[in-house]
Image: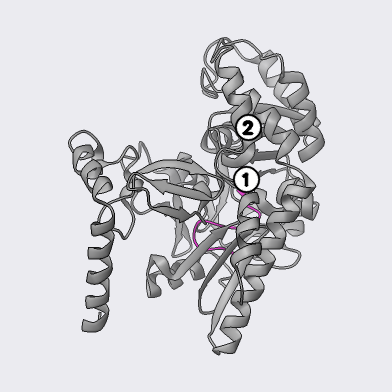
Amino acid sequence: MTPALSRLLESERAAFVAKRPRSRELAGRSRAHWLSGVPMHWMADWGTPYPLFVARAEGVTLTDVDSESYTDFCLGDTGSMFGHSPPAVASAIALQASRGLTCMLPDERVAAVGEQLAQRFGMPFWQVMQTATDANRAALRWARALTRRSKILVFQGCYHGTVDETMVRLRDGQAVLREGAIGPALDYAQAAVAVEFNDVSALERALQAGDIAAVIAEPVMTNIGMVLPAPGYLATLQSLCRRHGVLLIIDETHTLSSGPGGYAGTHRLSGDFWVCGKAIAGGLPCAVLGFTADVEARMRHVLASRTGGHSGMGTTLAANPLVFAALEAALVHLHTEPTHRAMQEAATRLERGLLKIFADRDLDWHVSRVGARIEFGFGPAPGNGSEAEAAMRRCGPSSNTRYIFGCSTADFWSRRFTT
């Protein structure tokens, strides 16, 4: 780092501290009772001297405890894709809160929400989970039960929450335990095969072995930079899974911004399971697991033949009435053509503006996009997880900058963004 850059960084840190004394105080107090001073350890993984403590989040605006306001382009890593506290969802949650939080019985909206999920996302059958991690874990358990096969296939650089079997990386042609994993119970590479995204030959070789129960895939890789599918790759993936009797799990937690029906609905991609968390209920912690009629019939056979006891899937309070209140409001008011149209228009403006800036300055930078989710970075766009990982190692973790456009963000950019 050059002396000039060091001075600039020090000046910015000093300015940050001077403007945010209340956040500094809370950071100090929190360290006495929270690991790393935060309720989830990764909340400390920012380049600031200490994290911001938020007093209010509304629309696309965050206000911290020092009354500083920020336009939020992260939006909870898509959890608040429709803006913070969308009025329809917030009202539904507030109303339900006075009527009961949990009762371990189906809510009166279950039938209507099931019909709306099926109509919107194309899967006829559903289950509700607390997080996408829970939903992915359940899908993998079902896949092994239905196929009686032991392994799963993941893509190098994948992210599917904290599902144990997916915590692997491809190194020297072999799946190995992912670096940084804390306290693994076993070597998860024994349960998973890893291949590069967009590598048809590697995918086919792995599926030919006959021991793969399921492929779990984001249609666009999003957590190791953004890696777009090569033309025809997802259709080939779908075809190969069917040919080899392998179940396909499509994880849309980070690609829901592609359109009202997610990436699968927009691009006519079909799998056996469809998973989505974060934004599905407008930001309230919730996830859904959708599946085909054929899978449901096979599930019923497994349930009829099993002995009693815990299945190892689901959490006691995941299907609480607050979730169904939020899901119903989100499906009616947020997962709509007008809402997504506004987000896409805003994302298009930013994409075009960035590309023009890069072209005008002859910069070898790229813009990657999946619906209203945009990322730009140094160099050419990566074609697989290893290329994305290598680019991050060369340039540092901040080499890719991610923007997510919520419905309220569209209004901000229509007023503020110019090229």
Q: Residue at x 28, y 60 (%)?
A: 16
Q: Are marks 2 and 1 in contact (CB under 8 Å)?
A: yes
* Mark 1 crowdedness (10 Å alpha carbons): few <14, some 14-19, many ≥20: many
Q: Which residues are magenta?
A: 212-229
Tell me, yes or no, whether the highlighted magenta stretch contains residue 221. yes
Q: Position of residue 408 (x, y in %)?
A: 62, 50
Q: Residue at x 50, y 54 (%)?
A: 72
Main secondary structure type of the part rendered in magenta:
loop
Residue toward you, 298 or 348: 348
Tell me, yes or no, whether the highlighted magenta stretch contains residue 419. no
Relative to 188, 196 lies left or right: right
Q: Give SS at disc 1.
A: loop
Quarter of the image for the N terminus: give it: bottom left
Q: Is residue 157 depicted above or below 248 in this figure? A: below
Q: Amino acid at mark 2?
A: Val
Q: Give the CA distance from mark 2 to mark 1.
A: 10 Å
Residue toward you, 2 or 379: 2
Q: Is residue 157 depicted above or below 378 in this figure? A: above
Q: Amino acid at mark 1?
A: Phe
**Where does label 2 land, which residue?**
89
Q: Is residue 241 shown to the viewer in this render?
A: no
**Where does label 1 land, which residue?**
82
